[in-house]
């Protein structure tokens, strides 16, 4: 049971975390996950009946912590984003405040006049900060940034630093404004990368074409996609032909042709023709929905740096505030030094005590990296996976379907005693329920794809083949091992072959050929260039085939004849050979390797060919099925982590530097403000680089 709330106008990650923590304690809520980038709060509920109550409670919490945030239940109308008018209003207000400030400081005038100008500038820019600070004190949230700024500036007034107080408030508010602006800009550019959600579908009905919401379309309905429109649901083309721009879904820039009979996926854009499409999947299960779901959940799995920052923020602020209190009063009381001077130094402490720069820039960098990767057809399921990818030192590939296309062609049928057609028919019947690429190609060659109602019972023996009952016969179809363990001696044909036995007697074999993916060799080369030290291949296929592929592609070491559980054991063996902190990625299509995908540090699934189970189990999904994209993913992850580290080091060292300078009386308050909002702004700009993968 889940409920998803959209928190419109949520711009402070610190508050987002506070909201999440309190939402988690609401009755009936098992867990709360916050995605700051998509502004979604996901509540995992104990039961449906508690949903309304829990939502009401959470709404109260939100209005408590962030009164300006609007809580929505539907993601459809979150277009608001950044309100241009209120942004202009804020700018105008700050400009007016700054003019009063300049007038007060530059024009010679009697003290009370000057004071009035500065007070005016102060309230004009800082009124909201003061109001929010008071509200928060009433609620017991002491270390809130509004309160800290209010305290610092009021303190400045108290020690008669009037121009300082006004300037600090104006500077702070300007910084906040630009921070909001930058966060919104980056959110927008990330959202644009993932703008694949279709708005409506043109449904063909008995009385003409009607535009309806995609989730209202049923399986079997006919929809029309005009040139330039996005395909809203997965389906099969009934009529028409067109070039499809699949880049939003796969990152592939070359358009693909689609004609009657072809399968098409939602999210692609029909470029030059109109298509009539028979819908084969409801909207919730269409490609677009699945990808959106993956991407939206990505922000919820927090990486180590993200968790570190949340913890850091919680201790940093109280420590600095306590240090400020000690700094203000201990030297004057203990050594009789001038109180005013030390209070001033302490005020600078208060200004830098907010951890905003980090808290905001780190999730933003991760999200940028994930967004940039997805624009290249590499879906990374969260910060944890992106971080792991950056430490990837070994990659193991599955062979069939991963390094090879997994589209076999039957190139020879060698029966014994029965006819070629019969052998193919028995093999196809035995494979009727299998999704293995070999099975698919045999069924295609036999020209039969629907075996329902023929009384077939079949069982898949993973990594070996199938056993089936059909037409009163017991059929075995599979590799040498399968034959041998059933006491049957197969022919010693080479290459990829499927041996068939009828009622315990050898009936011949079918030979197949698979082709290497065109970028398989390049994939290995690029991995090495990206810092991967060892590349392995694990396959259930025989040694001869494995050797051929391994040497063509440039694999360091390969292991053949592996059953699915042996692949897991091999992966564990490779893992134990890695140094601490080094990660192993396994790339597979999910057929006979879903358990390995889950076991490796980073499971990488082929999105186009891969099974749903594989895509589910994987940490990274390659939409174009190109293994060479793994190296791109590693490159993007390294860049993102580099940016994250830069931001952490930059922000923390500037803050510490300013704290030290302030303690010695060398940091004026305006410098402290720079260390706070200025650093945040620069860190956000730096984070934006992660998007441009
Ligand atoms: P890979 O690890 O290279 O992807 P698999 O583990 O999927 O290979 O399969 C290993 C071998 O088992 C195949 O090369 C094939 O000989 C045999 N096999 C597996 N499933 C089937 C099937 N459904 N029909 C025939 N042979 C099969
Ligand atoms: Mg495979």
Image: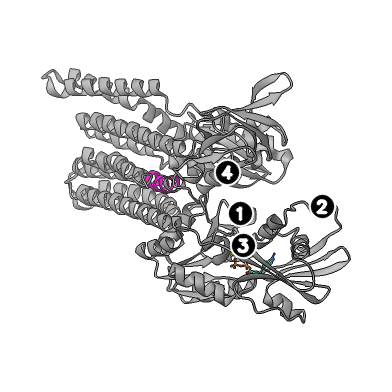
Q: Earlier in the sequence, mark 4 or mark 3?
A: 4
Q: Earlier in the sequence, mark 2 or mark 4?
A: 4
Quadrant containing ligand 1 = bottom right
Q: Are marks 2 and 1 in contact (CB under 8 Å)?
A: no
Q: Are marks 4 and 3 in contact (CB under 8 Å)?
A: no
Q: Are marks 3 and 1 in contact (CB under 8 Å)?
A: no
What mark, if any, has residue 89 been given in the picture?
Answer: none
Residue 121 versus residue 26 in the image, above or below:
above
Q: In terms of secondary structure, what is the magenta stretch mainly?
A: helix
Nearer to us: label 2 or label 3: 2
Residue designated by label 4? 293
On the image, the x and y values in percent for residue 574 come to: 50, 74
Q: Secondary structure at mark 1?
A: helix
Residue 33 versus residue 100 in the image, above or below:
below
Q: Are marks 4 and 1 in contact (CB under 8 Å)?
A: no
- Which span of residues is magenta-colored? 359-371
What mark, if any, has residue 594 been given in the picture?
Answer: 3
Measure how far apart labels 3 and 1 are at the Cα level. Answer: 9 Å
What mark, if any, has residue 452 been given in the picture?
Answer: 2
Residue 591 visible? The answer is no
Q: Residues within 10 Å of mark 3 (few under 14, many from 20)?
A: many
Q: Is residue 365 magenta?
A: yes
Residue designated by label 1? 616
Residue 44 versus residue 554 in the image, above or below:
above
On the image, the x and y values in percent for residue 279 come to: 68, 36
Q: Is residue 471 magenta?
A: no
Point out the image quarter for the N terminus.
top right
- Which is more toward the observer, 389 or 563? 563
- Which is more toward the observer, 128 or 232? 232
């Amino acid at each position: 049971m889940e409920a998803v709330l959209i928190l419109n106008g949520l711009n402070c990650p610190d508050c987002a975390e506070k909201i999440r923590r309190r939402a988690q304690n609401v009755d009936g809520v098992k867990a709360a996950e916050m995605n700051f980038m998509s502004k979604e709060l996901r509540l995992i509920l104990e039961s449906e009946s508690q949903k309304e109550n829990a939502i009401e409670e959470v709404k109260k919490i939100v209005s408590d912590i962030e009164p300006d945030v609007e809580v929505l239940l539907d993601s459809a109308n979150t277009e608001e984003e950044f309100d241009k008018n209120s942004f202009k209003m804020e700018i105008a207000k700050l400009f007016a405040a700054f003019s009063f400030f300049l007038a007060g400081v530059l024009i010679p005038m009697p003290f009370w006049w000057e004071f009035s100008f500065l007070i005016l500038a102060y309230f004009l820019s800082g009124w909201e900060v003061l109001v929010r600070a008071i509200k928060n004190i009433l609620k017991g949230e002491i270390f809130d940034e509004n309160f800290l700024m209010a305290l610092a500036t009021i303190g400045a007034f108290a020690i008669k630093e009037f121009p300082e107080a006004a300037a600090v408030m104006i500077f702070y508010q300007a910084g906040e404004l630009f921070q909001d602006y930058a966060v919104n800009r980056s959110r927008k550019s990330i959202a644009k990368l993932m703008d694949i959600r279709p708005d409506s579908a043109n449904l063909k009905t008995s009385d003409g074409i009607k535009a309806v919401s995609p989730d209202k379309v049923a399986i079997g309905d006919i929809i029309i996609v005009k040139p330039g429109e996005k395909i809203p649901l997965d389906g099969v083309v009934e009529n028409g032909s067109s070039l499809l721009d699949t880049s939003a879904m796969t990152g592939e820039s070359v358009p693909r042709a689609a004609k009657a009979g072809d399968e098409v996926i939602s999210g692609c854009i029909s470029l030059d023709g109109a298509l009539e499409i028979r819908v084969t999947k409801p909207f919730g299960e269409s490609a677009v929905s699945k990808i959106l779901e993956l991407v939206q959940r990505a922000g919820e799995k927090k990486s180590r740096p993200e968790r570190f920052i949340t913890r850091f923020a919680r201790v940093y602020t109280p420590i600095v505030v306590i240090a400020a209190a000690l700094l203000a009063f201990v030297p004057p009381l203990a050594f009789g030094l001038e109180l005013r001077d030390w209070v001033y130094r302490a005020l600078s402490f208060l200004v830098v005590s907010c951890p905003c720069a980090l808290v905001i820039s780190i999730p933003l960098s991760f999200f940028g990296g994930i967004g940039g990767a997805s624009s290249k057809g590499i879906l990374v399921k969260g910060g944890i996976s992106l971080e792991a990818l950056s430490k990837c030192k070994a990659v193991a590939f599955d062979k069939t379907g991963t390094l090879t296309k997994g589209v076999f062609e039957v190139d020879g049928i060698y029966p014994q005693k029965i006819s070629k057609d019969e052998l193919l028919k028995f093999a196809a019947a035995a494979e009727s329920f299998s999704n293995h690429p070999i099975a698919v190609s045999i069924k295609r060659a036999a020209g039969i794809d629907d075996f329902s109602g023929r009384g077939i019972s079949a069982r898949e023996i993973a990594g070996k083949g199938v056993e089936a009952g059909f037409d009163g016969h017991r059929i075995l179809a599979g590799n040498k091992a399968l034959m041998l363990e059933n006491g049957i001696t197969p022919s010693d044909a080479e290459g990829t072959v499927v041996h068939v036995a009828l009622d315990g007697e050898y009936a011949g074999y079918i030979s197949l050929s698979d082709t290497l993916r065109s970028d398989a060799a390049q994939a290995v080369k690029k991995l090495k260039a990206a810092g991967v030290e060892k590349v392995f291949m694990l396959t259930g296929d025989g040694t001869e085939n494995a050797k051929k592929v391994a040497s063509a592609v440039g694999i360091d070491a390969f292991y053949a004849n592996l059953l699915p559980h042996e692949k897991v054991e091999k992966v564990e063996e490779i893992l134990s050979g890695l140094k601490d902190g080094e990660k192993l990625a396994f790339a597979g299509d999910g057929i006979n390797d879903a358990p390995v995908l889950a076991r490796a540090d980073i499971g990488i699934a082929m999105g186009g060919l891969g099974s749903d189970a594989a895509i589910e189990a994987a940490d990274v999904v390659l939409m174009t099925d190109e293994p060479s994209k793994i190296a791109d993913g590693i490159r993007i992850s390294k860049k993102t982590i580099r940016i994250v580290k830069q931001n952490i080091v930059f922000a923390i060292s500037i803050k510490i530097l300013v704290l030290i300078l302030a303690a010695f009386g060398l940091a004026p308050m305006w410098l402290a403000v720079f260390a706070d909002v200025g650093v945040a702004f620069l860190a956000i700009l730096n984070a934006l680089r992660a998007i441009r993968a």
